[in-house]
Amino acid sequence: MRKNLFVLLAAALLVVTGCKKDDNTAGNDNGAKMTFTATIDNGGSKTTIDDHDMKWAKGDVININGKDFTADEAGPSTTFTGDEVGKKDGKYMAYYLVTMGEGGSLSLPAFQTYAGVNLADVNPMYAESENLTLTFHNICALIKLDLKGTGSVKTITASANQPLKGTFEILTNQDGGYYAHATSTADADKSVILNCGSEELNGTNAKTFYIALPQGEYTGLKFTLSDGTYTYPIEISGNKELTAGIMYEKEVTGVEFVPTKPEGAFPGLFTVGVDGDGNPRKVYFSKGNLYWNGDSFEIEANQYNYATSWNTNYVTHFYWSSDAAEAYGESNSDITGTGSDVFFTNITGFVANNESGWYTLSQSEWYYLLRSRTNANSLKSYYLSSAIKIENINYKGIFIYPDGYNGNAVGGEGVATWAAINEAGIVFLPYAGRRFVNLQGVVSFSTSDTFEYWSSTPNGAANAYYLYMNQNTPVVSSQRYNGSPVRLVYSAN
């Protein structure tokens, strides 16, 4: 039965059999040694995860007042030996997994590591004592995600309304345990990533993933699974109060990695580049060109729609500017920008279709789409059309085919209806002309035979790159004061 809410599973959460040795192991010198006895608080009961007792593993490392100590044997209680260390403020303060800072502060890591039921690189603990006996407590809550579906899980990103990594302090709770508390919420990083390698979901049996989160009351808690190309979001509705030392379970069935498509986009996917790991970067195209209706940016209902005259309440050709008001203004005076400017990507005052996330392809992305992706030079990827007839009107334009398209070429023949073109996710960019302002301040339009679409890449303070109707050199530079059409995309990764 699918669980829609977190379920409290345990009153205290400890470390699992086979804990992996921390990477911060320091070799002991020939000086005096000390031995501490360390136990893990289990709330007075025997607690297991997947039939594995929670206990230390031989070789585990803890940090006591700045020095590393190594577990001599495995077990729920064992001895840790290291170089002699003195007390701080009359105490021995010990950390497992996290790096100790001055004044009892700590740093929760930006990345956690999946290792099955082994929580060595996930679950931080803390202990303090005036003698050589240490009792460790979990300082975070642990989330147990049981995932059932298909695909390969590479990362799980947790995001919320409060800090999840960075500088924290240790505070004492009412039960005598400890918990991690953010020292500041200003500019806090509110996400943390669990690296999972490439764990396969087999569609039959659930696979368990653990991720540690600080204690607190959460709103907007969300987990985003990624297979390296696509994502799968898991949103937790309502408020969730997480307590350190407690494990919470979320069971999710039907996991399938598919790209998130916004309302104003076609279904076709287009590769526009690769990331640093060689994975393809894919986008959706909007269903039509961008326009300004006098109050907001919207997306045309049809791919072939564009204006043929100047109208302040229906602007379809935009000047290249880092400010939205300049872009749809009657003229463009924004020629003081730099090479770091952007256009309809992070442009000031820009949201399309009441949705954020839309952006304009860069110079390199346009080029990759039309010249570098698989089969980019074939007819099925880039097709020049003399005209396509829609409601007895001929529209000249360019068709760009989605990745893997194996249907007919479109235009005057082939796909019979415009609806079929849209359903196939084929992009049509009409010859929409351009607008400019002459020396007398009069706004004019060129003929519809002019083909140019802006990129987001500037070329100095007065120029920028745009898509041009040339298969060999598809992206060239032009003056920013020319008003050109804009076709937006949305990332599918």
Image (cartoon, rainbow, N blue to C red):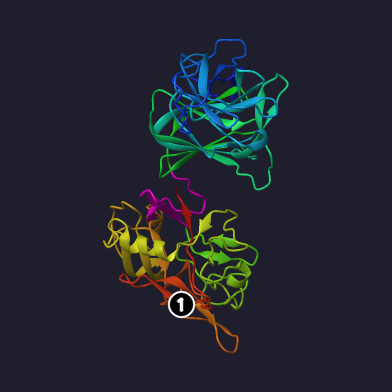
Magenta region: 259-286
Question: Does 287 appear above or below 158?
Answer: below
Residue in the picture at 48% in, 48% down: 261
Instruction: Write down the residue under mark 1.
Output: 478
Give the camera-side residue of 297 and 227.
227
On the image, the x and y values in percent for residue 120 come to 48, 26
Residue in the picture at 60% in, 30% down: 65
Give the camera-side residue of 93 and 377.
93
> Looking at this rendering, what residue extends furthest in the right direction?
174
On the image, the x and y values in percent for residue 395 come to 40, 70
> Looking at this rendering, what residue extends furthest in the top direction?
45
Left or right, 220 with respect to 146, comes to right
Left or right, 467 with respect to 409, comes to right
Question: Does 329 appear above or below 241?
Answer: below
Give the camera-side residue of 186 and 324.
186
Name the amino acid type tagged 1. Answer: Ser
**Location of residue 84 by image quarter:** top right
How many discs mark residues in the rendered view? 1
Crowd band around label 1 with a 10 angstrom C-alpha radius: few (<14), some (14–19), many (20+): some
Residue 219 seen in the figure: no
Please say whether residue 34 is one of the residues in the magenta stretch: no
> Looking at this rendering, what residue extends furthest in the bottom direction?
440
On the image, the x and y values in percent for residue 297 come to 59, 62
**Location of residue 472 by image quarter:** bottom left
Question: Does 79 appear above or below 481?
Answer: above
Question: Does 63 appear above or below 484?
Answer: above
Q: Disc 1 on helix, strand or loop?
A: strand
Residue 281 seen in the figure: yes
On the image, the x and y values in percent for residue 470 come to 34, 73
Left or right, 131 with respect to 426, comes to right
Residue in the picture at 43% in, 72% down: 452
The overriding secondary structure of the stretch rendered in magenta is loop
